[in-house]
Image (cartoon, rainbow, N blue to C red):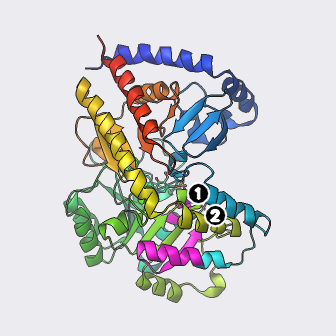
Amino acid sequence: MIERSRIQSLLAVEEARFVESHPQSQALFARARQSLLGGVPMPWMVRWAGPFPVFVAEGKGAHFTDVDGHDYIDFCLGDTGAMTGHAPDATIRAMAAQLHKGLTFMLPAEDAIWVGEELARRFGLPSWQIAMTATDANRFAIRLARHITRRPKVLVYNYCYHGTVDEAFIALDANGVPGPRPGNIGPPVDPTATTKVIEFNDIPALEAALAPEDVACVLAEPVMTNIGIIHPEPGYHDALRAITRRTGTLLIIDETHTLCTGPGGYTAAHGLAPDMLVIGKPIGGGMPVAAYGMSETVAAQVRERIARDEADTGGIGGTLSGNALALAATRATLEHVLTEEYYARSIPLADRFLAGVQEVIADFGVPWTVQRLGNRAEYWFRPTPARNGGEAAAAIDADLDRLMHLWALNRGILMTPFHNMALIAPQTTAADVEQHTAVFREAVAALTCT
Ligand SMILES: Cc1ncc(COP(=O)(O)O)c(C=O)c1O
């Protein structure tokens, strides 16, 4: 068993070690606090495990260095934004060439067609649009779903994450009552007015929620990835598709993270048939870009129901969306980086990561579990895989989480913050994975030694 006092004493040691070995980051943080709220450019960055974040010097492939000269194996990879590895050569070449030819025109160029054709080929949906972020793509897909179905509500899973989409910041409390998700900042309306929330893998709840036929769309990750990795139970996706079809509800599959499964995401790998599909994060090799695709039926309804003269004032799109630089980056990334070969190489490495963690868990008998999806693996502080978001959330242990991250960081390993996820880049090596296993083993040994 792991004693709480042990976690606290190890945390104190690791924090002191972190402060001592990161003087330049500490100095930059002190300066940053003068001009940046919380000393960081984006609020989540205050949540890194140390008393201040590591400031990056530069990154290439699966590694980066910080301003104190430390080298890190990066298993976080910009929380999937850099799943391609940092500064992927093909993407950078294409972007460099485009930089001299203009960045944004609000006019299409041939790259857009190439990208549309490639996305159609990979995901099996014929019609595509480009956005800046997966959040935006989700927001636009939801708007289209509401517009087409003329229904007010959206359905999501408890403890899902789909970006900063207002509708999705809802959760069930301990009694199963929906309300604003804890921490929801300034909700524009009570989310129960816009959204129904159920647990993942609960088919009767899905039936009941969709039966009144007031839900425009289900917005679903095909495997939950933002509260640990939670796989669908056998038959769940068939039921989801059948019930959404029967009730006239559109099914939006968000593949932003599950693109780790393969070149066509979980959708292509498992033969899903969504009405709409969202991707983002790594498709531009780190350049902000996202996309959403739709079936021919949805596309026809969109064409029919959106007046051309109002296309710019309907709440969909953005001045810089679909810009030339983003599309050049996306074309190169899809063509040369997020390839079949990449997945063929990285998935076995994620398996190796999983096996290493599994072995340590077994050797020390800690009540933890580890799951894998494609080239992503994640351990969680409960003995069995969670079946849904509520179960997974109940196992969050903020102090233990912080300790595991800081322990790794102090030994040159960056894990995805706020959970314990690792992604494999094209350049990640077996030695990188073994290094993680060794460091993880040391941490668990320190936690359990008596
Ligand atoms: C499944 C999923 N969808 C959408 C998003 C939003 O991506 P972004 O923050 O790039 O808008 C995220 C971000 O973590 C995500 O995990």
Asked if the stretch drawn in magenta spans residue 442, the answer is no
Q: Nearer the viewer, residue 145 or 404?
A: 404
**Separation of disc 2 and disc 1 at Cα?**
7 Å
24 or 161: nearer the viewer: 24
Looking at the image, is 167 positioned above or below residue 148? above
Task: State the quadrant of the C terminus.
Answer: top left
- Amino acid on which the number 2 mark rests in the picture: Ala
Give the mark, 2 or 1, whose residue is nearer the N terminus: 1
Residue at the (29%, 29%) spot, across then down: 360
Q: Which amino acid, by three-letter code, is at mark 1?
A: Gly
Mark 2 CB in 8 Å range of ligand 1? no
The answer to whether 355 is drawn above or below residue 411 in the figure is: below
Residue 245 vs 347, above or below: the answer is below
Q: Which segment is the magenta one?
A: 114-138
Determine whether 288 is above or below 149 in the image: above
Kindly identify which numbered label has been placed on residue 285.
1
Image coords of residue 423 (percent x, y): 45, 46
Mark identifier at residue 329: 2
Magenta span contains residue 135: yes
Q: Quadrant of the N terminus?
A: top left
- Indicate the position of residue 37 as horizontal and vertical percent values: 68, 36
Residue 264 at what x, y percent from top left?
Answer: 42, 67
Which residue does the image show at 27% across and 48% down from the upper left? 176
Q: Secondary structure at mark 2?
A: helix
At x 43%, y 16%, the residue is 10
Q: Do the residues under discs 2 and 1 have CB atoms within 8 angstroms?
A: yes
Tell whether 372 sits left or right of 72.
left
